[in-house]
Image (cartoon, helix red, strand yellow):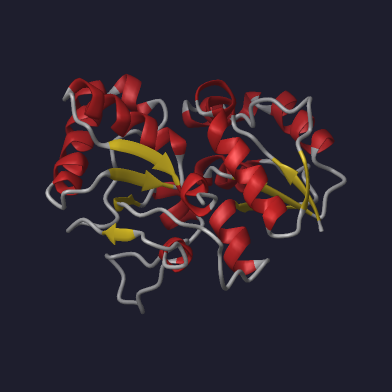
């Protein structure tokens, strides 16, 4: 299975360890992983700002870079959802990391260990857009592909906040145009996580984790953030 690893801009620039953990994890699970060198932004920031019609260059470059793979995998639900909904040139199948592990590789066990108590943050795009977990506002049987994988990690204790799928307030350019509302939403999410005495806040979208990390730092909190890929790849 030949996999093209899509590394979103902010991961490449600020959290490269997440891309490395994703690559190592996929290789451990038997995938041949290639990171196209000429990949750039998928165009999501422009689309979020109302300029989706101007992302043609991004769409073409993305399709060109990832045309020859069996699957395209990325540790970012928001970027994956954007590509699914906007890039009509792409012929390959693109998956968010946890979605790929559960739905394509059908992972049933992991050789991972992370002996800490963590608070799970479920990001909106992955949660509601990609259906990585059931929604609290719908009358449906509870499920979570993310928790399914986390339960395979030795020593890990997962704490879920009272409002398990509420937005953290990042929202892409929303956190710039509506800064006060964004920060208040982030503080509310952090308060619920800290009430569970967690050591880490983890999630599948670095954008949300980056937003929460900024608030934690301003509060001088010892709590850290980690991407799920780092947890699933821990040993």
The percent position of residue 143, horizontal first and vertical second, equals: 40, 72
Q: Is residue 132 above or below residue 227?
A: below
Q: Is residue 21 above or below residue 109?
A: above
Q: Residue furthest bottom?
A: 141
Residue 94 left/right relative to 115: right
Locate residue 57: give its quadrant. top right
The percent position of residue 163, horizontal first and vertical second, equals: 20, 56
Locate residue 139: give its quadrant. bottom left
Locate residue 173: give its quadrant. top left
Q: Residue at x 21, y 37 (%)?
A: 185
Q: Residue at x 57, y 29 (%)?
A: 16
The percent position of residue 198, horizontal first and vertical second, equals: 22, 48
The percent position of residue 157, horizontal first and vertical second, equals: 30, 60
Q: Residue at x 64, y 23 (%)?
A: 54
- Residue 166 or 161: which is nearer the viewer? 161
Q: In the picture, which quadrant includes the N terminus?
A: bottom right
**Count of marks overlaid on the render:** 0
Q: Residue at x 38, y 30 (%)?
A: 210
- Residue 196 or 37: which is nearer the viewer? 196
Q: Is residue 65 above or below residue 155?
A: above
- Regarding residue 94, the answer to whether it shows in the image is no
Residue 22 left/right relative to 168: right
- Regarding residue 78, the answer to whether it shows in the image is yes
Residue 45 left/right relative to 217: right
Residue 185 left/right relative to 36: left
């Amino acid at each position: 299975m030949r996999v093209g690893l899509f590394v979103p801009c902010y991961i490449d620039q600020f959290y490269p360890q997440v891309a490395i953990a994703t690559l190592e994890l996929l290789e451990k699970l038997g995938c041949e992983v290639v990171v196209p060198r000429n990949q750039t932004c998928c165009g999501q920031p422009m689309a979020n700002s109302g300029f989706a019609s101007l992302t043609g260059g991004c769409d073409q470059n993305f399709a060109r870079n990832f045309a020859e793979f069996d699957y395209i995998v990325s540790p970012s639900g928001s970027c994956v959802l954007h590509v699914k909904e906007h890039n009509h040139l792409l012929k390959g199948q693109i998956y968010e990391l946890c979605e790929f592990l559960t739905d394509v590789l059908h992972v049933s066990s992991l050789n991972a260990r992370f002996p800490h108590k963590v608070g799970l943050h479920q990001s909106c795009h992955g949660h509601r857009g990609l259906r990585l977990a059931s929604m609290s506002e719908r009358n449906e049987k509870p499920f979570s592909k993310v928790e399914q994988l986390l339960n395979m990690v030795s020593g890990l204790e997962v704490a879920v906040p009272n409002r398990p799928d509420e937005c953290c307030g990042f929202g892409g350019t929303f956190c710039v145009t509506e800064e006060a509302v964004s920060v208040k939403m982030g503080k509310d999410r952090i308060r619920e996580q800290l009430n569970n005495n967690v050591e880490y806040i983890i999630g599948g979208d670095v954008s949300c984790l980056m937003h929460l990390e900024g608030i934690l730092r301003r509060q001088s909190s010892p709590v850290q953030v980690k991407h799920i890929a780092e947890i699933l790849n821990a040993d």
